[in-house]
Every structure is written in C-alpha cells, then in structure tokens.
Amino acid sequence: MPDEPLLDIIDLVKHFPLGGGILGKPRGWVKAVDGVSFAVSRGESFGLVGESGCGKTTLGRLILRLIEPTAGRIQFEGQNIFSLSPDQFMPLRKRMQIIFQDPYSSLDPRMKVDAIITEPLRAIQRLTQRHQQETAAALLEKVGLQKVDLDKYPHEFSGGQRQRIGIARALCVRPELIVADEPVSALDVSIQAQVINLMQDLKDEFNLAYVFISHDLSVVEHICDRIAVMYLGKIVELATSGDFSRRPRHPYTRALLQAVPLPDPHRRTKPLNMEGDVPSPIDPPAGCSFHPRCPHKFDRCARETPPLVETTANHFVSCWLNQGRGLGNDELRMSNDE
C-alpha cells in the first residue's frame, strides 16, 4: 500500500468577488483556482508553472491557509486544514513555511538578521537569547553565510544573500513542506543557480517537500520531480520532469517549452502558433479553456471541458485530442513543420 501523501489537494476552488454590484453584491467572480487536485509526497519537489495570472500564487496561499477556499479541501497528513480552528492549526503551521519572491521586500529592514531568522520560532515558543543566537548562527552556516552576519541589517546584503536569509528563516521551525513562490525570479541569472543548488541540497539533507511556483521552465525542470501546468485556474498537464520536457501532451505545455531559449544556436524550435491573448478569468471560455488559442482545436473543444486523465504512467493531460490522450506524433510533426 502506498504511503499517505504529505499534502493532498482535492477539487480546490477559489473565486474572488468583483465589487461594484447593486446593493453590495458582487458583479462577477474571478475564477483564480477552479477545481485543482494533486498530491505531494514527503521529500518531493512539485513544480507549478504557467503564465502570470493562471492561479499559481493563489494556490500557494491556499496551501498555507493564508486565504480560505471557495470549495474543496487540502489535507496535510490526512487532516483537512480548513476544518481546524486557528489554535488547532497552529501545530501544523510550523510544519509548512514559505520562501517569498522578493528578497528586498520580504525582510523587515528594521530587524537584524538574528531576529529575522528566529521570528517564526519565537512565535510558537519562548527562546532564551543564547538559544536564539545559536539557532540563527547554525542556520546561517547552512545557507552559506557567516555568524558575523547575525548583527547586520538586510540592506547590508546582496539580493542573493537576502534570499539565503529568507531560506534560513523558512528552515527555522524545521518544516516538512515549503512553498517557494518564484524564489529566484528577482535575482540575477548567476545568483539563481547558486540559490537553486542550495535549495536542492537542503531538500536532500532535511527531506523537505517543495511546492515550487515559477514561470521559468528551465528552473523548474532542474529542481522538480513532477511538474503541473496551470492555465486559467486549472491544471492542464501533470507529469514527471523528464516526461514533461520529452513528451508534452497538451498544446499549451508544448507552447511553453518551445518558448524557452536554447543555449545551442544550431538547435532551434519553432514557436507554436497560439492565437490571441489569455482570456479573462472573470469570464473563461466554455469547454477547454485553451481552445480559443489552440491551433489543434476542433468542435468538441468549445463544447466540453476535458477531464484530467492519466494517459501513460504518471502522465496526466486535459485535452480532447486523440480521444483524450492529447498531442500525438502527428500533431507534433505538424507543429514542427509549421
């Protein structure tokens, strides 16, 4: 019998009301997350990718219970986190932490590094000054900084160093799950590699599970075991990282992969010819949400929403092509010849 997942997301929905309606009623709803399901195992790195506005960050906030869902549930070790009172949820809170996107705004400029790192720990238990400094010093060393940095302020560090401090803060309460929301997008490319390698080393050392949110496919493919592609609040493809890049089954996934620059000037891929812009999440299209932009669409795509089904082992796709199996060899050849 397989082990119970650490995190299990089931039919999760989050719709935000639009103000300005009559008598205070919403004049519409932004469908940020619209029926998402997946599970994350202990020690697994799970990637969420997609264009801006697809619902990735909202999903991350739901996982940490920073906002409440419209429907669905999230189970952490079998417990529905939304059924717990704030006091009941507190023991789980320290087992899940976040690494923020912007290292410049996520650290309080008025606090020294030792206070920043141990802030989550002080929120759940009393600490002596000695214990606080010992904990902060040990974590700084783990992320490649020095004990002398404890007495400094955030403005004295570079962007990459600040993100290392943010990682140390997330590790302070020894979490089992970390939501990393675009953790390297604000950093220079050379620094990105250092931070990603650090996160990989820490994952292996502490058996951490990551939900890694990013729009950068090259970063996600490097660190993640499995990758889910989101489009207009839904997951349209989910696969292992190797299968994801070698055998994309959804036209949107293929378009994202073809948009990634290749380091070899002799290898070029022709971008998939997508039509128009991303539809509004306030009024998403009927049927497959990607069909208005898809070069492979046919009549059924505009009428019915394709379910997310397993086409091969551990590879799921939401697409009506080839009887629900997504892109096949014929469509891949046609895309390359266009």
Image (cartoon, grey):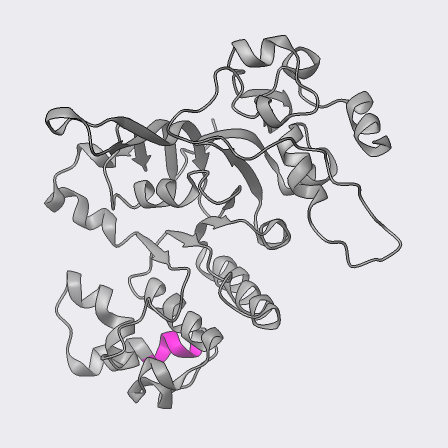
Residue closest to the far right: 266
Above or below, comparing residue 144 to residue 180 in the picture: below
Does the image show residue 317? Answer: no
- Residue plotted at (46% across, 80% down): 158
The front one of 291 and 317 is 291
Count of number-bearing discs: 0
Above or below, comparing residue 114 to residue 320 in the picture: below
The front one of 86 and 251 is 251
Does the image show residue 308? Answer: yes
Residue closest to the far bottom: 148
- Residue plotted at (37% across, 52% down): 176
Above or below, comparing residue 311 to residue 233 in the picture: above
Q: Quadrant of residue 269?
A: top right
The front one of 312 and 130 is 312
Q: Is residue 104 left or right of residue 184?
A: left
Above or below, comparing residue 215 to residue 202 in the picture: above
- Residue plotted at (54% across, 19% down): 288
Across and down, in percent, residue 148 comes to 36, 90
Across and down, in percent, residue 37 comes to 42, 28
Magenta highlight range = 137-141
Q: Quadrant of residue 239?
A: top right
- Residue plotted at (33% across, 42% down): 63
* Residue 300 lies in the magenta-colored region: no
* Residue 138 lies in the magenta-colored region: yes
Could you tell me what secondary structure mostly forms the magenta stretch? helix
Across and down, in percent, residue 130 comes to 20, 83
Q: Is residue 108 left or right of residue 313?
A: left
Across and down, in percent, residue 132 comes to 22, 77
Q: Quadrant location of the C terminus?
A: top right
